[in-house]
Image: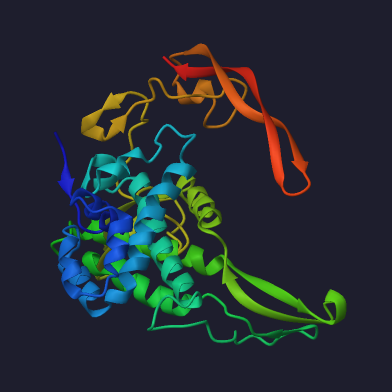
Amino acid sequence: VYKQYMKWPVFNVGLSIQSRGLCYSATFSLGWNQTNHCKLLDALAHEQLQLCRRNIELMHSIVHAAKMTKNTCQNTFGDMRWNCSSVEKAPRFTPDLAKGTRESAFVFSLAAAVVSHSIARACSSGELPSCSCAPAPAEQAGPDFKWGGCGDNLHYGLQMGSAFSDAPMRNSRSGSQPFRLMNLHNNAVGRQALIDAQETNCKCHGVSGSCSVKTCWKGLHDINHIAMDLKSKYLSATKVIHRHVGTRKQLVPRELDFRPVRESDLVYLISSSDYCTYNEKHGSLGTQNRQCNKTSNDSGSCDIMCCGRGYNAFTERIVERCQCKYHWCCYVTCKRCERTVERYVCK
């Protein structure tokens, strides 16, 4: 059975805590104020362990990012044959995440984006003593607004997030050079997606909410928005090979007539399984008994999800609240209604 013990992805941190018998809430109650807490995280690479000890106040945000990465990945791919369930096995990954596949490209990029996002948000919410709100943007304010408020500190988030995410990949013991170059590239793609996800938020001022003056600041889109952007990059990812270009080796498209790799492209080294049938050697759990959508034409449709094997139908009775009414003052009453829905699962 192929299993590889990996120390690099951000969500290893959170799952390592769980594997040591400490839940997230218990870890948070420790306060992350003693450097020996870093020893609890046996999934950390040496460089990450040192960073943990020097910046113990960041670890609450990093553990939060670990949990968010796992949940976001599974939500984003919930209607796909590969549904990101293998992240539950961290840090002992199966080949779908340990061998330089398209799926590992997505997970690395997402994890890198989420950890920087988490730190940037922690700065603006006052959770970290080492940073605060972002400085006012360099671009000139418009005639109807001024820069102010408390923007997410993206600069600090990127600085500390990249230090944590990239550190293991700069060590020759963290896999082959092509594998490390691939992961460093995809980490950078994730952080660039975060940079591109900035938005301008404003608050109105004026008599009776007239909004004659606005105070604006730069904030970050939520992680689901960024994950969908990275999913699009996953679907169009470029397969690469490590070969000499001039005097040094670098990652270039495997197909010679393919355009050069761009900084915004996810890249991968090895083609994935189709994930239709169970195959532990390839990290595929298969799609048998996965729920599908009979009327859809997308990736969650029964035709695609079931890989042509067909599907079984069954009915399910659902009890839910209905006919809710508000009563003055102040409560709501609802009735309980039953309805029957038809479900479909792959054979």
The figure's colour scheme reads rainbow
77 shown above or below 312 = below
- Residue 212 visible somewhere in the drawing: yes
Q: In terms of image quadrants, where is residue 35?
A: bottom left
- Using residue 158 as the reference point, say whether residue 313 is left or right of it: right
- In the picture, the quarter occupied by the N terminus is top left
Whether 332 is drawn above or below 262: the answer is above
Q: Looking at the picture, how far across and down is residue 139, in whole percent?
A: 64, 85
Identify the residue at horizontal 54%, vertical 25% (top origin): 301
Location of residue 182 in the rendering, given as x and y in whole percent from the top left corner:
31, 58
Image quadrant in which the C terminus is located: top left
Residue 115 location, quadrant: bottom left
Relative to 69, does residue 295 appear above or below in the rendering? above
Q: Residue at x 47, y 55 (%)?
A: 259
Q: Residue at x 53, y 50 (%)?
A: 228
The answer to whether residue 11 is visible is no
Percent across and percent down for residue 273 are 33, 33
Question: Height in image: 133 above or below 193?
Answer: below
Residue 39 lies, in percent from the top left, at: 15, 65
User: Number of labelled discs?
Assistant: 0
Q: Nearer the viewer, residue 328 or 231?
A: 328
Residue at (78% x, 47% y) in the render: 328
Q: Nearer the viewer, residue 321 or 52?
A: 321
